[in-house]
Image: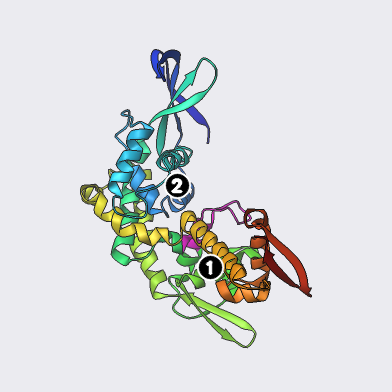
Amino acid sequence: MERHILKESHSKADRLGDAVVSGKIRVESVEFPHDFQERKEIFLASFNKSTACVVLLLLPEVGRFVPPKGLYKGFVRTYDGTVFENVNRNTPADYCRYLAKRGLVQVQQFEYESGYVSSRGFSLTEAGRGVGRSVAALALSFEAQNGFSLFEVLRSPNRLSSDNRSTPYTVARFLEYLYPINDFQRKSDIIRSLGFPNDLGFRILMSMTESGIVERKVVGNSVFLKISRNGRMVVDEFLEPLNFLIRQDIENCEPDDGLVVSVLSRLSHYARQTAPLYFLHSHSNKMRAHDSNIQAMVRSIDESDFGMTSQQLSRVVGLHPATVIRNLDRNADRFNLRRERYAKGVIKFTRDR
């Protein structure tokens, strides 16, 4: 997809501190794809995070721009009283830049004479205003009604498959393949039917089992799988309506704005309901849990007269001993940690005080 500059003009009245500087304003957007599968992948990878849905729904109509500061204030106000009210000031703008690369948001840029470029504002594209808002509202509504995050089900949009498709798209393909089948199917047959490499198929199906959208049973040396009740719910209440919205948009049919109007009128309610669901699986929470584990291990080392081994620390935080060693090695300078070989594959940690 190519980037298109829609409009370009000069400004002589932009302020940088107390100085008035001149430069060039340009509005950038990316063409939204026409292909059904490309659109589906964009929506699955973009709106598996409820925070991204909220950001899109906070944006103004085509041609009217909200500045990054105004968007941040609206985001914080919407998430007032939740874990996301203290979000980094750049996070809402970062979501917009992500969505802009996928044709749902346009960005107003100011290029100073020095060549420095800053984002002045964000607005919906035609695709964002139409089918984009409908899908964002659908995702928020699904999570609020069913009490689990789409991120937990669809996973992070890393590109793992051989055809460069994202993980959420690949998970959706597995779910839609399994949906009409009532009986357990051999795992290797499922992977072969969809044409995925074995290692990729195993990883994706394992994550689907962990998230509860696929049931698993073992017979002898073979693993059998079938779609679970929650998996069917994802297909019935999210994937099928998503497919319908995309087809409707491709055929240039005006979407029914009823759900969008309903969600927009109670956006804070939906944001607050879905915030804890996504936060459990968010990068912020993982970093917080990681730091908490490091602190717990350091406290245990401090409380021990002779230091602690990687096996002992593994039992403290519930992590694999190899992970304990790797994490403490990375934080050795931060906490003045010393390591010594205790036994084969076992490291003893002490702390200089």
Q: Is residue 322 magenta?
A: no
| Residue beneath the point at 50% across and 72% down | 210
- Quick one: 308 or 269, which is closer to the camera? 308
Task: Find numbered disc 1 in the image and state the secondary structure of the residue it sits on.
Answer: helix
Q: Quadrant of residue 100?
A: top left
Tell us which disc is closer to us: 1 or 2: 1
**In the displayed structure image, the side of residue 245 where residue 201 appears, left or right:** right
Residue position marked by numbered label 2 in the rendering: 39
Q: Is residue 225 above or below residue 260?
A: below
Query: As displayed, is residue 352 above or below residue 54?
Result: below
Whether residue 349 is visible:
yes
Is 116 on the left or on the right of 131, as rendered? right
Q: Quick one: quadrant of the C terminus?
A: bottom right
Which residues fall within the magenta stretch? Answer: 153-173
Instruction: Determine the residue positioned at 36% across, 31% down.
Output: 67
Identify the secondary structure beneath mark 2. Answer: helix
What x and y, as percent, mark residue 120? 40, 27
Residue 53 picture location, percent across and down: 36, 49
Residue 291 position, x and y percent, is: 54, 59
- Decide which of 45, 49 is in the foreground and name it: 49
Q: Nearer the viewer, residue 197 or 180?
A: 197
Q: Residues within 10 Å of mark 2 (few under 14, many from 20)?
A: many
The amino acid type found where label 2 is placed reads Arg
Alpha carbon distance from label 1 to label 2? 24 Å
State yes or no: residue 171 in magenta: yes
How far across and how far down the image is residue 55, in percent?
36, 44
Tag 1 residue: 207
The reply, left or right, for residue 142 in relation to residue 151 is: left
- Sequence-first disc among 1 and 2: 2
Q: Nearer the viewer, residue 184 or 106?
A: 106
